């Protein structure tokens, strides 16, 4: 309950004992069952009359049930006014072996919850082998209301075949007084399934839960359901949740529904430079999220030693955000606070990446810089940049790096490479104007960035001395999260992020493209931009195999927007802990998984009567119904006693004939059918041929080579890697196996070969000589091969039986079989060509003379597993 789980029942007591040494291994012991019941009662501190119901082991046997019933009568049946009610789930679902006990627990818990004792099916008449008068125990042959002035209690028995006896006593769970959950205006409902169809069915089933507190439903969905690959997140209040679920169930888009398939890979947080700011950013979120608001205030406190303005004031002031010495620290604070909010929902990145001044936020989040050192770097460096104001600018160009470099003139330099077709150029205003004009003339999109200084250019060099001086006090350290530098284009130890690094960060080209490509190659699949508006996601998304998503959006920076971003991460496979979204919520019952049920039961064949001639059917219906007049009319004879005697015999004859016909339909035999083989079969690649020492290769390597393959002959298998196929001639070794002398060495070697190849995808062909004739050692490999084909279908090529005397066509037929002609996997070569194994019906042919047993007949194996049936 402390963890948010409802208490369905209380385990009052339990006991175990063993009676295997009493009556025999599988015979139950009544005294041992009485002892385990009394031990469980003692453990619970209860008397027999405190228990109302026993869920018995109850297998329905004439030996076990009376023994168990008498043990219950001798214990629970004594010293009580109300009878003990007796039931067993096995009458509903049969014996589920090791799960039988827990199935009884589930049934009993539900009975305790609902206050109803369910009846035991198919047990209307109590067994005559039990002395029911010896105690107050009654069979539950009808449902009974379960009302008591005290807590309801029930016991469950489960007995193992080897003599283990278990008995547990359950008591109904008390209903806790829970405070009603506050219902927030927006919550996320998280759904998942193993297929798109099941996901739609989940949404349809969940629509009926909107009458519950929506936060309780959200909490239950997030904390009590497995996250399967096909996912959806529906956000909103009560009405919009219902609308979104309807859209999801119908498979149509909706603005508050996010869907996706979870991918694999690690997650990186990305922190951009300037450009994501907007007046009012983060203020709504700071009011709605205590985590975000607290971290924002911590950033404000860290900045207060270096700035003369208040963070929340400038976040709302568009004119203040136009100043570089304000906007950069403000963005830093928002980005660091967003990362903390992501972390509070369980999204802890595997790596961080920063773009230009975004690396300062990345360093703080990684742990390489303290919050105070991060504030120093961003505040004092942005003040130093004021000296560059008016002397330059920056332009984004939508073209590859090589094309942009070819357009550079004096006064221009590459400031950043964000993606395969996204480059930023910095330089003097006049040179940038000329670049924009040239690009427009050639149809290349070029856009000026609203700054009046040229970062990442030679103009920055005049600030080096000042920056090294004012940033000297920082103390970088090795961080907790990996830091990929867009300055060096490599992973870097956080301890190297000193004053010199932060000067270089401002001076050199930003290589975000290298960072994204490297991380993608190392298994990073999701890049989350921690900023008030996504400015890098489009460039990041140009890299194959990665997903990029944002946190907030311009003029949409509240809690609901962040929840949607969490949902976007979740449906892509990022692990999200949703519990902070539902403070104070409680578990409620929800619909279980919407299984997509399929019916695999084979339909019965058409009854012979339905296919019979209508006149025939009418005649036999009259015979079965003993309708003398109808049969006499059909046979054109007068009804009489003789006909009345014939009819039963005729019915019995028909039943015997029908049964014989049914048995005949089950009889099959093996037949070999010709298969058309190509005249010039073609093979390719390297083929491994495994030939036992001292045995002929049967011309297999030559057949492979003659038809385009490269054979490699070995006597011992090592690895199938790099081979198109593996051909085993190991069955030719019929000497006794050293592992089991009653088996041929070839059969055990082929088994070991298949086991060694189990994880491979290379097809395995087992070759025999005389395997389809009366040669047991060769036929054994055919039995083994058919099992391999069923248990290891991923490596199965087939079985091929070679002729005892090859001729001029054998090589071509070997190649045809190994090429997979007509997808046949059980093939034999004979003088007439290729034959494929088939099962065909085998009508019964009675022997010319029936055997009539006389004297004594010895039946061997009659007491074994097969004979016992």
Image (tube, helix red, strand yellow):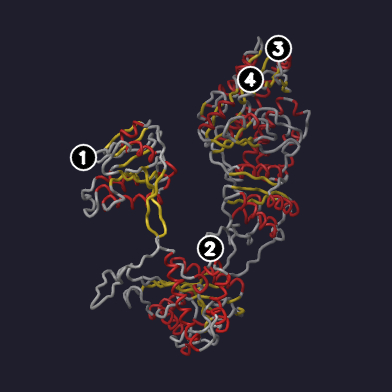
Q: Secondary structure at mark 2?
A: loop
Q: Is residue 242 visible?
A: yes
Residue 459 x, y percent position in the rendering: 65, 14
* Structural distance between the alpha carbons of marks 1 and 2: 54 Å
Q: Earlier in the sequence, mark 3 or mark 4?
A: 4
Which secondary structure, mark 1?
A: loop
Residue 357: name its quadrant: top right
Q: Is residue 3 above or below residue 868?
A: above
User: Could you tell which of marks 3 and 1 lies nearer the N-terminus?
Assistant: 3
The residue carrying pointer 3 sits among few (fewer than 14), some (14 to 19) or many (20 or more) residues within 10 Å by Cα, namely: some
Q: CA–CA distance between discs 1 and 4?
A: 72 Å
Residue drawn at the location 68% of the way across and 39% of the way down: 297
In the image, 625 versus 168, the foreground residue is 625
Circle 1 sits on which residue?
A: 694
Residue 623 sits above or below residue 761 on the image = below
* On-image quarter of the N terminus: bottom right
Q: Are marks 2 and 4 in contact (CB under 8 Å)?
A: no
Closer to the eye: label 1 or 4 = 1
**Structural distance between the alpha carbons of marks 3 and 2:** 81 Å
Residue that carries the numbered disc 3 in the rendered image: 431
């Amino acid at each position: 309950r402390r963890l948010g789980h409802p208490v369905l029942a209380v385990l009052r007591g339990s006991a175990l004992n063993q009676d295997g040494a009493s009556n025999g291994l599988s015979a139950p012991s009544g005294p041992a069952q009485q002892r385990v019941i009394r031990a469980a009662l003692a453990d619970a501190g209860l008397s027999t009359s405190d228990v109302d119901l026993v869920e018995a082991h109850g297998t329905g046997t004439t030996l076990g049930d009376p023994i168990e019933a008498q043990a219950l009568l001798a214990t629970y049946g004594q010293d009580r006014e109300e009878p003990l009610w007796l039931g067993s789930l096995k009458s509903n679902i049969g014996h589920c072996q090791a799960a039988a006990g827990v199935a009884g627990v589930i049934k009993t818990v539900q009975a305790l919850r609902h206050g109803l004792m369910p009846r035991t099916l198919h047990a209307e008449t109590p067994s005559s082998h039990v002395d029911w008068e010896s105690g107050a125990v009654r069979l539950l042959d009808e449902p009974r209301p379960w009302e008591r002035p005290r807590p309801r209690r029930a016991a469950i028995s489960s007995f193992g075949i080897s003599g283990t006896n278990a008995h547990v006593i359950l008591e109904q769970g008390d209903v806790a007084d829970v405070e009603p959950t506050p219902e927030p205006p927006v919550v996320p409902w998280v759904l998942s399934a193993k297929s798109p169809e099941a996901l739609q069915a989940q949404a349809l089933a969940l629509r009926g839960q909107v009458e519950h507190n929506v936060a309780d439903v959200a909490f239950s969905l997030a904390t009590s359901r497995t996250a399967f690959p096909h996912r959806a997140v529906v956000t909103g209040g009560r009405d919009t949740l219902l609308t979104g679920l309807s859209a999801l169930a119908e498979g149509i888009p909706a603005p508050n529904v996010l869907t996706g398939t979870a991918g694999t890979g690690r997650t990186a947080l990305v922190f951009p430079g300037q450009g994501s700011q907007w007046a009012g950013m983060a203020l709504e979120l700071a009011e709605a999220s205590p985590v975000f608001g607290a971290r924002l205030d911590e950033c404000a406190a860290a900045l207060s030693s270096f700035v003369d303005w208040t963070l929340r004031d400038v976040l709302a002031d568009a004119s203040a955000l136009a100043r570089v010495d304000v906007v950069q620290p403000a963005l830093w604070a928002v980005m660091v606070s967003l990362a903390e909010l992501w972390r509070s929902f369980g999204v802890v990145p595997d790596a961080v990446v920063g773009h230009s001044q975004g690396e300062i936020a990345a360093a703080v989040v990684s742990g390489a810089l303290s919050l105070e050192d991060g504030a120093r770097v961003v505040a004092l460096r942005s003040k130093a940049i004021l000296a560059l104001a008016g002397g330059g600018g920056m332009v984004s160009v939508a073209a590859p790096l090589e094309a942009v470099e070819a357009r550079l003139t004096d006064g221009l330099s590459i400031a950043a490479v964000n993606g395969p077709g996204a480059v930023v150029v910095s330089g003097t205003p006049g040179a940038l104007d000329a670049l924009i004009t040239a690009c427009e003339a050639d149809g290349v999109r070029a856009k000026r960035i609203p700054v009046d200084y040229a970062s990442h250019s030679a103009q920055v060099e005049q600030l080096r001395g000042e920056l090294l001086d004012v940033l000297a006090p920082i103390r970088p350290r090795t961080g907790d999260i990996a830091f990929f530098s867009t300055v060096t284009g490599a992973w870097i130890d956080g301890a190297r992020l000193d004053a010199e690094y932060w000067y270089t960060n401002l001076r050199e080209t930003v290589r975000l493209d290298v960072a994204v490509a490297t991380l993608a190659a190392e298994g990073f699949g999701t890049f989350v931009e921690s900023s008030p508006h996504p400015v890098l996601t489009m460039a990041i998304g140009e890299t194959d195999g990665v997903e990029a998503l944002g946190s907030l959006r311009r003029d949409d920076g509240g809690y609901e927007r962040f929840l949607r971003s969490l949902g976007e991460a979740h449906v892509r496979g990022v692990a999200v802990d949703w519990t902070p979204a539902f403070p104070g919520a409680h578990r409620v019952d929800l619909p279980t998984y919407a299984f997509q049920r399929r019916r695999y039961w084979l339909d019965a064949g058409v009854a012979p009567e339905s296919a019979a001639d209508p006149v025939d059917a009418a005649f036999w219906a009259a015979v079965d119904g003993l309708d003398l007049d109808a049969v006499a009319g059909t046979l054109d004879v007068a009804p009489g006693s003789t006909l009345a005697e014939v009819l039963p015999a005729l019915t019995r004859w028909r039943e015997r004939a029908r049964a014989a016909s049914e048995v005949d339909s089950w009889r099959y035999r093996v037949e070999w059918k010709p298969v058309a083989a190509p005249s010039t079969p073609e093979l390719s690649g390297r083929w491994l041929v495994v030939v036992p020492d001292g045995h002929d290769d049967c011309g297999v390597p030559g057949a492979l080579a003659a038809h385009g393959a490269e054979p490699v002959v070995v006597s011992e298998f090592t690895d199938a890697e790099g081979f198109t196929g593996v051909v085993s001639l190991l069955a030719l070794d019929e000497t006794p196996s050293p592992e089991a002398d009653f088996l041929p060495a070839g059969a055990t070697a082929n088994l070991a070969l298949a086991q060694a190849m189990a994880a491979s995808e290379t097809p395995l062909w087992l070759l025999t000589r005389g395997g389809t004739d009366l040669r047991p050692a060769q036929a054994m490999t055919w039995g083994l091969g058919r099992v391999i084909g069923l248990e290891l279908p991923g490596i199965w090529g087939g079985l091929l039986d070679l002729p005892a005397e090859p001729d001029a066509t054998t090589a071509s037929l070997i190649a045809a079989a190994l090429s997979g002609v007509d997808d046949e996997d059980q093939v034999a070569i004979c003088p007439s060509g290729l034959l494929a194994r088939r099962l065909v019906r085998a009508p019964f042919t009675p022997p010319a003379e029936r055997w009539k047993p006389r004297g004594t007949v010895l039946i061997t194996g009659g007491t074994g597993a097969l004979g016992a049936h």
